């Protein structure tokens, strides 16, 4: 049975041509503009619809913007594949905020969105507020990564090409089976959106290019991470089988003003796996009036 519009979990979207890069970017907009802004940055193999539960809940108190990275979902790709990297993604996200006349925003990011979010914070301390990051790889290391993630980063990797370009349906199934805790219940219309992206050549190229041009941006972030002034909430799924939870502890220890929350019964896709727990910690963090100190709390 086909999902009708009233039941659909898909977020309403529109497009804008960003000023500096000139790319047409697809985004979702929820909530009232007079409320504080929060920008949501997705990971892989996903697009902005990964926030199907989180964005509507946040929109009660925040002006929520969720974008598709260049080459993903409905957004135009960079003409040079090497431009799909953390520093360019951070600059593109700031260009997006500038185009929409957003002077100040909090940021929530997962997976490949983690490094750009933190780079945005370090480069724009007066414009980026509190930062929430989940299950990504901020530093140039493969010690915490699964074999799939390690494959993506290797130049000319046959495994990476097989997973991303040759067998996207199998790759998607691996992601869902391994990325959620025990069982997943991702809405069928969202799953179809992600799968359609998996078959899209533009998305395939952007996906592979990001991972293979990731290390310089990670090294840059590692060299400047101590400069991040904003409070940062690091959230991680305890049962993340793509990026080991131990990396969350390293990341939190390297930040000067961080809190670490481990979600006990979650896998890699915390925003889809356990949105209620993510929202509980995130909303409390966003509403705090004073800086947070480093801590580790398991729930």
Image: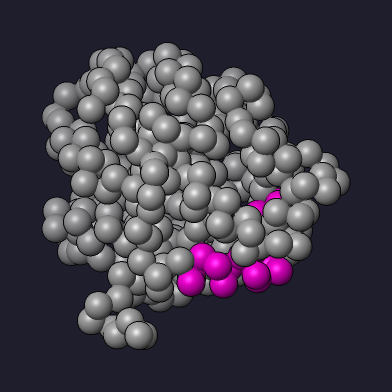
Where on the picture, by quarter, is residue 154?
top right
Residue 37, magenta (yes or no): no
Residue 207, magenta (yes or no): yes
Question: Can you see residue 241?
Answer: yes
Q: Is residue 71 left or right of residue 282?
A: right
Residue 266 appears at what percent x and percent y? 35, 38
Residue 44 appears at what percent x and percent y? 54, 52
At 57% from the left edge and 51% from the top edge, which residue is drawn?
Answer: 174
At 75% from the left edge and 48% from the top edge, which residue is drawn?
Answer: 160
In this rendering, is residue 1 above or below 93?
below
Q: Is residue 285 left or right of residue 222?
A: left
In front of the other: 212 or 21: 212
In this rendering, is residue 75 above or below 66?
below
Residue 243 appears at what percent x and percent y? 53, 32
**Image quadrant occupied by the C terminus:** top left
In front of the other: 43 or 190: 190
In this rendering, is residue 205 above or below 123?
below
Residue 1 appears at what percent x and percent y? 35, 85
From the image, give the main secondary structure of the stretch colored magenta: helix
At 23% from the left edge and 81% from the top edge, which residue is drawn?
Answer: 6
Please provide the residue range marked out in magenta: 192-209
Where on the picture, by quarter, is residue 219?
top right
Where on the picture, by quarter, is residue 214?
top right
Question: Can you see residue 233?
Answer: no
In this rendering, is residue 209 above or below 143?
below
């Amino acid at each position: 049975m086909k999902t009708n519009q009233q039941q659909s979990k898909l977020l309403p979207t529109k497009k804008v041509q960003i000023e500096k890069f000139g790319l047409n970017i697809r985004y979702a907009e929820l909530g009232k503009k007079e409320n504080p802004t929060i920008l949501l940055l997705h990971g892989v193999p996903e697009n902005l619809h990964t926030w199907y539960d989180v964005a509507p809940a946040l929109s009660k108190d925040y002006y929520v913007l969720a974008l598709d990275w260049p080459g993903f979902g409905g957004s135009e790709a960079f003409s040079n594949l090497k431009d799909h990297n953390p520093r360019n993604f951070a600059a593109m996200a700031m260009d997006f905020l500038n185009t929409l006349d957003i002077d100040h925003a909090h940021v929530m990011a997962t997976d490949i969105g983690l490094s750009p979010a933190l780079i945005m914070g370090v480069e724009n301390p007066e414009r980026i507020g509190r930062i929430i990051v989940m299950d990504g790889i901020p530093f140039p290391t493969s010690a915490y990564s699964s074999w799939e993630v390690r494959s993506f980063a290797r130049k000319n990797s046959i495994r990476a090409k097989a997973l991303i370009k040759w067998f996207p349906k199998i790759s998607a199934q691996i992601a869902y089976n391994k990325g959620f805790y025990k069982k997943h219940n991702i809405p069928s219309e969202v799953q179809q959106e992600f799968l359609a992206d998996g078959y899209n050549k533009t998305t395939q190229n952007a996906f592979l290019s990001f991972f293979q041009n990731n290390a310089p941006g990670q090294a840059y972030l590692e060299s400047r991470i101590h400069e991040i002034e904003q409070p940062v909430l690091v959230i991680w799924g305890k049962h993340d089988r793509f990026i080991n939870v131990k990396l969350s502890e390293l990341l939190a220890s390297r930040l000067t003003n961080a809190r670490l929350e481990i979600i006990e019964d979650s896998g890699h896709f915390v925003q889809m796996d356990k949105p209620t727990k993510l929202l509980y910690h995130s909303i409390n963090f966003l509403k705090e009036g004073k800086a947070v100190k480093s801590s580790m709390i398991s729930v």
